[in-house]
Image (cartoon, rainbow, N blue to C red):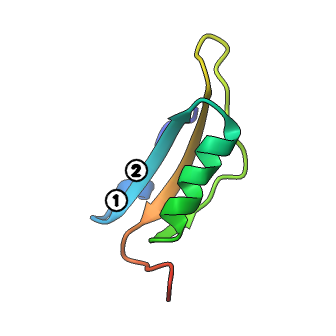
Amino acid sequence: MREINEAHVALPGLAVVEVAAGDDETAFAIQKQLAARCAIAPADRTTREPSEPGVRLRFFLDLHENADT
């Protein structure tokens, strides 16, 4: 995966979330649950490392923005 850019975590309340899961469905379900609670910049695909089990999904989260507004 690419390195985390300083701008993605420059302020309190901003976070980079990386999910390691056994399959795509689980990783996207976690993303969906977090998107229901706060603003995210969602990922549209997972990545696989040949030497590691499962998949990874990275997305960006902003606790300042409520998903309901």
Residue at the farthest top position: 51
Q: Residues within 10 Å of mark 1 (few under 14, many from 20)?
A: few
Q: Is residue 60 above or below residue 3?
A: below
Say what secondary structure mark 1 lies in. Answer: loop
Q: Is residue 60 visible?
A: yes
Above or below 42: residue 36:
below
Circle 2: residue type: Glu
Q: Which residue is mark 1?
A: 10
| Residue marked by disc 2 | 6
Q: Whole-percent x and y of residue 10?
A: 34, 59
Q: Identify which amino acid the numbered label 1 is placed on.
A: Ala
* Residue displayed at 45% across by 48% down: 17
Q: Is residue 5 visible?
A: no
Spatial CA span between label 2 and label 1: 6 Å
Q: Secondary structure at mark 2?
A: helix
Check the picture and name the quadrant holding the N terminus: top right
Residue 8, how many percent across, how many down? 44, 56
Q: Residues within 10 Å of mark 2 (few under 14, many from 20)?
A: few
Which residue extends farthest right?
Answer: 45
Whether tag 2 and tag 1 are in contact, CB under 8 A, the answer is: yes
